[in-house]
Image (cartoon, helix red, strand yellow):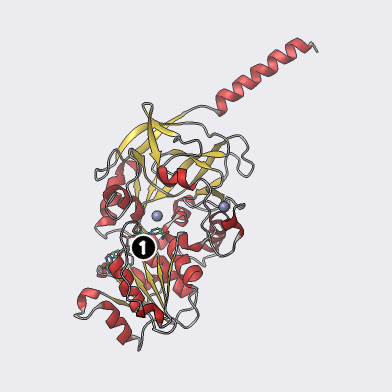
Amino acid sequence: ANPASQISSDSHIVTITCIILFKVIKCKAAVAWEPGKPLTIQDVDVAPPKVHEVRIKIVATGVCHTDWEYLYESGKGMKSRPFPLVLGHEAAGIVESVGPEVTKFSPGDKVIPLFLPQCGECERCRSPKTNQCRKNWANMQLGVMADGTSRISYKNQQLYQFLGVSSFSQYTVVPDTSLTKIRCDAPLDKVCLLGCGVSTGYGAAVKTAKVEKDSSCAVFGLGAVGLAAVMGCQVAGAKRIIGVDINPDKFEKARVFGATECINPRDHEKAIQEVLVEKTGGGVDYALECVGSPVIMNAALESTAEAWGTCVIAGWTETETMNIMVEKILMGRTLKGTYFGGWKSVEDVPKLVDDYMNKKLKLDEFITHNLTLDQINVAFDLLKSGKSIRTVISL
Ligand code: NAD
Ligand code: ZN
Ligand code: ZN
């Protein structure tokens, strides 16, 4: 063969490949232009993945309370985040393309994006004591990738990526340490819930609290996180699981997940902690706070047994403080927090998917509504009015 023609045809092939791999994708996303305003559906550009990044097609996303909080309580209970922002962080999808140096993913893989990374190399990843990997952390809190920019834009204006994910978009780009591959037979419109709420509540009970067999538990707040905590208490073999919520419409679902009784604090004159201490003859072994309010966090702590009770906080607030009477801790109670249920994200989420496929863990029962991306504001209304547990948005 003629060497000259060989070179020119090879370089031609290289050029074509580059065009295919590195094209910008135009798609729909729900954009939060400013805090406190409903989302608007826009045609956005999603840039190709850079080094150690993966572009994914989002197939389904849950709508979590945290998405709502960052939109409507930015600067109140939440720290301010940069806007315009593409929210969404509880999702599942399919790898579309991979950037340079990505070794663990290929186009077509089913994946769950992770707002908590697991790089596997840092000191925290190597410790069994924590799941708090800090790879790309500062960037992701600012809504950008490792190079300081976002991959999503609208008419050349950068749109920030919420927690480095942004699943309220048909396509997004995430770091390869913030993504996990799952089995190919997993239904994405169900396992998306393992990207946040269900993993958080379930892990709060089984991993952070380490609920024991025959113990007594109280779960405050019966949204998706709280119901998943109830499920965790049941899987762990707790004998008594008391669901607490000011919305009694949640009680029926709570029983489905394993609550043995339910209490509405508004039905009682006494403080809820007093009611629980009386009911259980001294307090519960484990209390799980899944609301996100310091007042409820105190109530949860004070409802645990004095000598050995453990209270785990899963509910989210970033700027508020808790005021604890020291004596409540001195006598032997433990107060803990949990982030993403204590799971090491990359390695544990596929195992949770297996648990769902093997019917150890429920997911379908959390889903009260299925909507499309253009109905995203309806999903927020349903969540806020207490009418939904989880809405799954199909993209
Ligand atoms: P949700 O809105 O679906 O559920 C909250 C529930 O709390 C509702 O049922 C509501 O009626 C109930 N509630 C409100 N006030 C109450 C009170 N005074 N007493 C008892 N119950 C009360 O929310 P969700 O999606 O389940 O999320 C729950 C919390 O968990 C939020 O704060 C969210 O930000 C947080 N969260 C934390 C993590 C984490 O990693 N720690 C992850 C996901 C979500
Ligand atoms: Zn790490
Ligand atoms: Zn969430």
Q: Position of residue 71 (x, y in %)?
A: 30, 47
Does any atom of ligand 1 lie closer than 8 Å to the CB of label 1?
yes
Quadrant in which the N terminus appears: top right
Q: Where is residue 32 in the image (x, y as percent from the top left)?
A: 31, 40
| 330 up-or-down from 346: above or below | below
Q: Nearer the viewer, residue 260 or 318?
A: 318
Q: Name the residue under label 1.
A: 315
Q: What residue type is labelled 1?
A: Gly
Name the quadrant containing residue 303. bottom left
Q: Which residue reaches farthest right?
A: 1
| 277 up-or-down from 223: above or below | below
Crowding near the residue tagged with mark 1, few <14, some 14–19, many ≥20 C-alpha atoms within 10 Å = many
Name the quadrant containing residue 314. bottom left
Q: Is residue 199 visible?
A: no
Q: Which of 295 and 195 is in front in this view?
A: 295
Q: Is residue 390 visible?
A: yes
Tell me: 389 left or right of 147: left
SS for callout 1:
loop
Q: Which residue reaches farthest bottom?
A: 281
Residue drawn at the location 69% of the way across and 15% of the way down: 9
Q: Where is residue 210 in the image (x, y as percent from the top left)?
A: 50, 73
Residue drawn at the location 47% of the way across and 83% of the way down: 214
Q: Position of residue 109 (x, y in %)?
A: 57, 44
